Image (cartoon, rainbow, N blue to C red):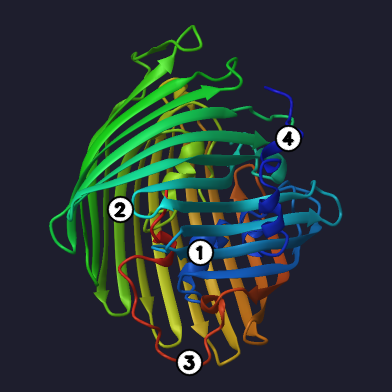
Amino acid sequence: MNQRSTGGALRVLPWLLALALSAGASAALAQTSPLTIQSLFFNTGSGVHRGNFLELDGGLIYNDNVDLTRNGSSDVLALLGLVGNISRLDAPRLDYHINSDIALVKYLRSSFQTQPFGYLDAAGEFKIVPGTLSWTARDSYSQAILNPAVPPTPDNLESLNFFTTGPRLILRPTLRTTITVDGTYSYLLTGSKSSQYINIDHHRYGADARIERAFSSTFSAYVQGNYDKVEFKDLLINRNFVAEQGLAGVKFGDARTFFDAQGGYTRLHLGAGGYNQFQVGPNTPSGVNYRLTLSRLIAPNQRLSLYTYRQVTDAANLFRINLDQPVPSNGQNQILTGEPFTHREYGATYHIEGPRTVLEVNGIIFTDRYTIVPANNRDVHAATAFLSRQLNLSWSLELGGSLEQDKYFSGATLHTLNLLASLRWRVGPRVGLRFVLGRTSYTPYGYPDTQVGVIASYALTAAALTPDGLVTPTPLLPTSPATQPLIY
């Protein structure tokens, strides 16, 4: 193991802290309790917001077992953060997308050090020559577990800040054909308060080319090639690799249906011996990659979404892959390693809305296969359910739960049960209060803990405002707010 990082992923993002200094109590609960059901997809599933919302949240949470041990100590958490999912696309000069559920957490009894929890994904595209040449940038902040054999307390987490930037060239040889070429430079910066800190900092050089042909206003086909070269800072515990990927796909979308199907092949070259020597061997996780996504409005107020995909990837990149899924799996307890692996995932969600009630049910199954260290292999099954009921003009009730099983090939099996009840009070057009009661059971090595608190919110956008009355919601879109198009 390496010595812990003193600066961590936060040094390159002072603006991230500025944003975090005002909300996201739900994100903090998700990571410190861990109340994973309070991740962003659960907030959007509540029906409180319908996309393009941004709000500041802050509050106090009492936790009776922050250590997740038999005789764990209690503490009070002060939370400040930012919650939202907002996009501005097809603007004259600047497009952007922000997907955030992040909070800065201070433990008033000093159980753990003050640190951010949750995630933030922000992307922007500056159009130098609109329609032809632009410059893109994307930054993703998330966390991963250092040691799956012990409870996921704040001292068992590591921060990952993944920044990517580069030029984009768009050519349109015909009215229906678009060629997009990207050149990218990325840098991953990690940090942890833990003595088990693992240094997977690296540089990443990439190039992507995509040719898309529109056959109608709703149907298109595309071919794409991707190249990534990853060079780690610490080569004692990591191996450099090169990933080459080719794929082809078709996409369909109208007022009721969204469908995307793609398939291809990923070839991975692992570093061997020298800094720039790569090889393909029996332990190289290469293979077929695919993605199938289907989201359908089965009624004006009901949406069913299904997806599956297989991808050769790494821990730093998996979080960004999952963000645009119909059932975003941001709550996954991802293991931290620099080793590339094969990830397979299956997800489904059912969403129904009424004049006063919203119900959402989600299911996720995924597997991770590591060819170099098979002991890290695992299978995960998870299910979540959420019910929201508008009681009157000022009050609404939310009930939710999640059940997850993580089975590791090393022999450990982990079960996590989360239960949540919250009561929202609309104080004013932009101001609200949320009273939260949560319960987490973490077996076999963790012990139950209870969270009780109050969270204040301030709406920054019109979509974050509380509805003025008990009216039928606007028609659903074929995809959920959490699956708004990513810029990069």
Q: Earlier in the sequence, mark 4 or mark 2?
A: 4
Name which residue type carries label 4: Ser
Q: Earlier in the sequence, mark 1 or mark 4?
A: 1
| Mark in front: 1 vs 4 | 1
Name which residue type carries label 1: Asn
Which numbered tag is attached to residue 307?
A: 2
Q: CA distance from mark 2 to mark 1?
A: 21 Å
Residue 212 locus on image (x, y percent): 22, 48
The one of 57 and 224 positioned closer to us in this rendering: 224
Q: CA distance from mark 3 to mark 2?
A: 33 Å
Within the image, what quadrant is residue 55 found in?
bottom right
User: Which residue is drawn at the image coordinates 57% and 62% (left, top)?
Assistant: 38
User: Which residue is drawn at the image coordinates 53% and 53% (left, top)?
Assistant: 122
Q: Earlier in the sequence, mark 4 or mark 3?
A: 4
Which numbered tag is attached to residue 85?
A: 1
| Residue on which disc 3 sits | 470
